[in-house]
């Protein structure tokens, strides 16, 4: 019998296991390495193919990848948006399909005759589709949906206080003027509105045409009815159809406020005189600040031309000569006066005039023909000087003290107004008193003016009454009746002046603010819109004047300003 092989020991078994494990590990590593190598080769081949294609197209690989991704994302977003629109809109209604077919055509194969037939015979919709079509055509889908869901509901409760009239406190400083009595401490809104309307109508002189709705509607109806007739009349005529009225209308004066005439140089203190140049578009101002200034009037900037300063000579009054080449100025406490020659630029002092024994020379008047200068002295004396030589020609005297004088437009007569209320009419050539009359109701005379057409004489008294007379009556009667007694001033009438066309009489008082009124001469009524209601603008009026053709009106006040207003009825300066 053969002998059995010996069993291996423990050490040999361990060596065998380790060898087997090492062999398996080696095989696995080789397999993984082979797989990785294969994958790397495939990736390299793919990249090489891509580079080859891009090189053929002339593109860079780094710029293509982001562009392709962006295009893919945009295409996906567009597809999602269209899908959402289809879900929202759903299938179109019959009306919409018919409308699309009518406008765009059902398909590309539709023939021309079929399209013309559809346009000739419009489609007919059922009642439901037609109602929906009308609703959709007038309103948007959101509005239609909101209208369909909206249901009018009654209020749950009503507050009685909402329906009651709310009372307004009338003791407020801005509403005190609307109280008619002390008992009206509160008013309803409706009554306050009525009071405001009444105040507006008083300020405007009635209801303006633009605010009268009923008359506007009626006028529109009548205008539409008569349009055809007017057209026929216009076609039968030639010439100018639009023209301005020659006469100044009453009631409302078309006026606008401009910048002050002396905007570039206000006077320090009271402005004594404002006067327009007789021929040039220039205005002069003079005051207690001892200066005389000239300004060009354009209504916009009013640039300053020149200013002269008279040392220690506060100006009481200044006036242009008739030819506009000189300015005569008197002082407040001097017995001399100055003559400023604008052509030569020289200032000529006129010392004491021989034969004139006066302590102060203040008030004076220049004749319209430029020949005479009338100095108003004390104790009723009137000194007539030659404008050329500045020498005394003659002296006249009135009873009492003379407060004001005025030449007639032809310079043949002088009207002198005494403090006792008597008016003396003097002949300039003979220096004799032609006539004397009493101003009706006057206790103390203050100012006098004669119209440019020699038709009217205005006399202002200390009571504030301005009597308006006709010159022919003044020359005949000793106690003439005024054609109009203007009682719109409550303090002394200190200044009166006519405009060049004798259509406006300006009256003013320097004793209270805003005391200026413009009177329409043909109707003897006051313009209701001047000065502006409840607006402090003029203050104390010292002097007034109209431009040569009434285009502008200026007021000198105590604040050193020469306020300027444009009268729109007159087109020229």
Image: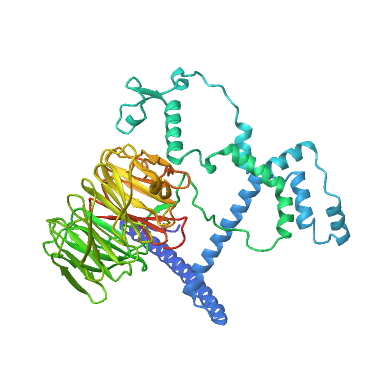
Going by the image, does 304 lie left or right of 39? left
Quadrant in the picture for residue 372:
bottom left
- Comparing 44 with 271, the one in front is 271
At a point 30% along the width and 37% down the height, the residue shown is 490
In the image, residue 422 lies at what x, y percent?
Answer: 29, 44
Q: Position of residue 177 (x, y in %)?
A: 34, 31
Q: How many marks?
A: 0
Q: Which residue is drawn at 45% across and 29% down?
A: 194
Residue 46 image position (x, y, % from top left): 53, 73
Q: In this view, does 8 lie to the left or right of 191?
A: left
Q: Nearer the viewer, residue 445 or 182?
A: 445
* Quadrant hosting residue 392: bottom left
Query: Splitting the image into 4 quarters, where does residue 90 fall?
Result: top right
Residue found 52% across the figure and 64% down from its top: 69
Could you tell me which quadrant the N terminus lies in?
bottom left
Q: Position of residue 92 (x, y in %)?
A: 72, 46
Q: In this view, does 149 lie above or below 4?
A: above
Front position in the image: 300 or 248: 248
Specify the quadrant that holds the C terminus: bottom left
Compared across the picture, whether 222 is left or right of 176 comes to right
Q: Which colour scheme is used?
A: rainbow
Q: Can I make out residue 244 in this image?
A: yes
The answer to whether 298 appears left or right of 332 in the picture is: right
Viewer-proximal residue among 17 and 7: 17
Say if residue 538 shows up in the picture. no
Residue 492 vs 355, above or below: the answer is above
């Amino acid at each position: 019998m053969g002998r059995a092989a010996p069993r291996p020991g423990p050490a040999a078994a361990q060596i065998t296991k380790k060898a087997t494990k090492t062999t398996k590990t080696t095989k696995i590593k080789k397999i993984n390495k082979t797989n990785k190598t294969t994958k790397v080769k495939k990736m390299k081949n793919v990249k090489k193919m891509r580079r080859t294609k891009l090189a053929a197209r002339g593109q860079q690989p780094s710029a293509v990848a982001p562009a392709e991704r962006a295009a893919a994302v945009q295409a996906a977003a567009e597809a999602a948006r269209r899908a959402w629109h289809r879900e929202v809109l759903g299938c179109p209604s019959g009306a919409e399909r018919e409308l699309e077919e009518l406008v765009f055509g059902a398909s590309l194969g539709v023939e021309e005759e079929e399209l013309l037939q559809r346009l000739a015979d419009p489609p007919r919709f059922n009642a439901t589709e037609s109602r929906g079509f009308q609703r959709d055509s007038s309103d948007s889908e959101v509005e239609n949906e909101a209208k369909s869901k909206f249901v009018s509901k009654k209020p749950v409760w009503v507050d009685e206080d909402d329906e009651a009239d709310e009372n307004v406190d009338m003791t407020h400083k801005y509403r005190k003027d609307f109280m008619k009595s002390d008992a009206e401490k509160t008013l309803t809104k409706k009554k306050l509105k009525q009071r405001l309307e009444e105040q507006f109508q008083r300020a405007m002189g009635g209801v303006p045409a633009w605010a009268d709705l009923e008359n506007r509607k009626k006028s529109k109806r009548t205008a539409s009815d008569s349009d055809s007739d007017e057209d026929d009349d216009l076609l039968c005529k030639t010439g100018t159809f639009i023209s301005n009225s020659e006469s100044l209308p009453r009631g409302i004066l078309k006026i606008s406020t401009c910048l002050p005439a002396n905007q570039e140089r206000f006077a320090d203190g009271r402005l004594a005189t404002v006067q327009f140049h007789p021929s040039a578009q220039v205005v002069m101002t003079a005051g207690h600040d001892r200066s005389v200034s000239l300004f060009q009037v354009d209504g916009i900037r009013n640039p300053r031309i020149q200013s002269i300063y008279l040392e220690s000579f506060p100006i009481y009054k200044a006036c242009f000569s008739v030819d506009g080449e000189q300015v005569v100025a008197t002082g407040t406490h001097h017995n001399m006066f100055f003559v400023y020659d604008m052509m030569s630029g020289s200032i000529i002092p006129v010392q004491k005039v021989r034969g004139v024994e006066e302590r102060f020379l203040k008030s004076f008047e220049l004749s319209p023909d430029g020949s005479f200068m009338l100095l108003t002295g004390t104790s009723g004396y009137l000194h007539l000087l030659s404008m050329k030589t500045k020498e005394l020609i003659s002296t006249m005297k009135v009873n009492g003290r003379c407060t004001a004088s005025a030449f007639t437009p032809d310079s043949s007569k002088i009207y002198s107004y005494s403090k006792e209320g008597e008016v003396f009419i003097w002949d300039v050539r003979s220096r004799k008193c032609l006539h004397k009359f009493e101003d009706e109701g006057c206790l103390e005379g203050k100012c006098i003016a004669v119209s440019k057409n020699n038709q009217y004489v205005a006399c202002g008294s200390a009571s504030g009454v301005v009597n308006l007379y006709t010159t022919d009556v003044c020359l005949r009667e000793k106690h003439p009746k005024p054609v109009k007694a203007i009682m719109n001033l409550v303090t002394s009438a200190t200044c009166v002046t006519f405009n060049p066309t004798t259509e406006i009489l300006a009256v003013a008082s320097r004793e209270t603010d805003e005391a200026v009124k413009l009177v329409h001469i043909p109707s003897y009524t006051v313009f209701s819109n001047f000065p502006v209601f409840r607006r402090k603008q003029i203050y104390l009026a010292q002097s007034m004047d109209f431009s040569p053709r009434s285009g502008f009106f200026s007021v000198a006040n105590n604040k050193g300003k020469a306020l300027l207003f444009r009268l729109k009825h007159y087109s020229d300066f």
